[in-house]
Image (cartoon, rainbow, N blue to C red):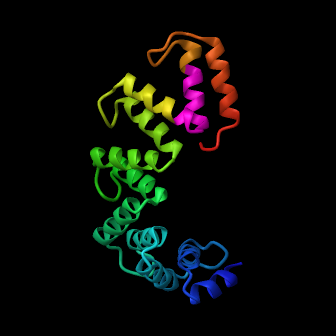
Amino acid sequence: MLREFLIAAHEGDKYAMTICAASFRTGWGTPIVGERAFEWAVKAANSGFPPGIAELGYCYEEGVGVACDLEKALEALRQAADGGYVAAAIHLAIRFASGVPYGLRMKCAISYAETAVELGEAFAAYMLGTWYESGELVPENIEAARMWYQKAADNGSSLGCIRMADAYKHGGLGVLKNLTASAEYMERAEHGSSP
C-alpha cells in the first residue's frame, strides 16, 4: 500500500505525502527511515496541509531525519492545531499537561484541549474533566469537571459516559443518585464513538 501512496506523493498529493512521512517516521508498513520521513514531511508541510505540518513538527520533536529542535517542533504543531488538525491540538494538550518536552504549561494545555473539543474530539472533553476533578494540574472544580464529562458523553466518549454513569450511581460530581440515569449512561458507553 505504501507504494501507492509514494506514487501519489510524487504526483503532488499532499495527503499521500503526509502518509509517506508518517510511515517512514513510525515504521508503518516500512522500516523507519528518518531522512525520507523528514523529506516527505517538509513537502507535505510546504503544501500547507495541517496534518503534513504536524508531521514536520513530530520529526523535529522526535529528531527523526533531522536534529531535534523543540522550537521548530512547537511552531509547526501550533500551526497545524490552529489550522484545524485535531490530532495536533490533542498532542499539544497532552505535552503541555505532562511538561514533556515543552514544560508544564496548564493554560496552554487547557487551551489546546478546548480547541480539540471545538474540533469535535470528545476524548479531549473527558481529559479536561479529569484535570478539573483531580485538582492535580488545575484547581479542583467539580462543577467544571461535571460539565466537561457531560460534554464528552454527549459527543460520544465512552469514558465520559462511564464517568457520568458512576456519578449518578453513587451521587458524585454534585449530581443526585439516579440509577436510571446511571444505566442510561452505561448503555450509551457501549455505543461510544471515542474513548
Q: Which of the 4 image quarters holds residue 184?
A: top right
Residue 158 counted in the magenta span = yes
Percent of width and height locating residue 191: 70, 37
Residue 155 counted in the magenta span = yes
Compared with 138, 109 (above or below) is below
The residue shown at (46%, 81%) is 38
Compared with 113, 41 (above or below) is below
Farthest residue toward the top?
177
Q: Is residue 54 left or right of residue 135?
A: right
Compared with 11, 135 (above or below) is above
The residue shown at (47%, 44%) is 124
Task: Give the camera-side residue of 143 and 70.
Answer: 143
Q: Is the magenta stretch mostly helix, strand or loop?
A: helix
The residue shown at (36%, 69%) is 76
Task: Give the camera-side residue of 146 and 84.
Answer: 84
Task: Give the camera-side residue of 157 and 84.
Answer: 84
Q: In this view, does 108 lie to the left or right of 94?
A: left
Image quarter where the N terminus lies is bottom right
Image quarter where the C terminus lies is top right
Q: Give the range drawn in magenta.
A: 152-166
Q: Which of the 4 image quarters holds residue 160?
A: top right
Percent of width and height locating residue 28: 63, 72
Task: Give the camera-side residue of 23 and 27.
Answer: 23
Percent of width and height locating residue 144: 38, 28
Q: In this view, does 167 lie to the left or right of 187?
A: left
Number of numbered discs overlaid on the protein picture: 0
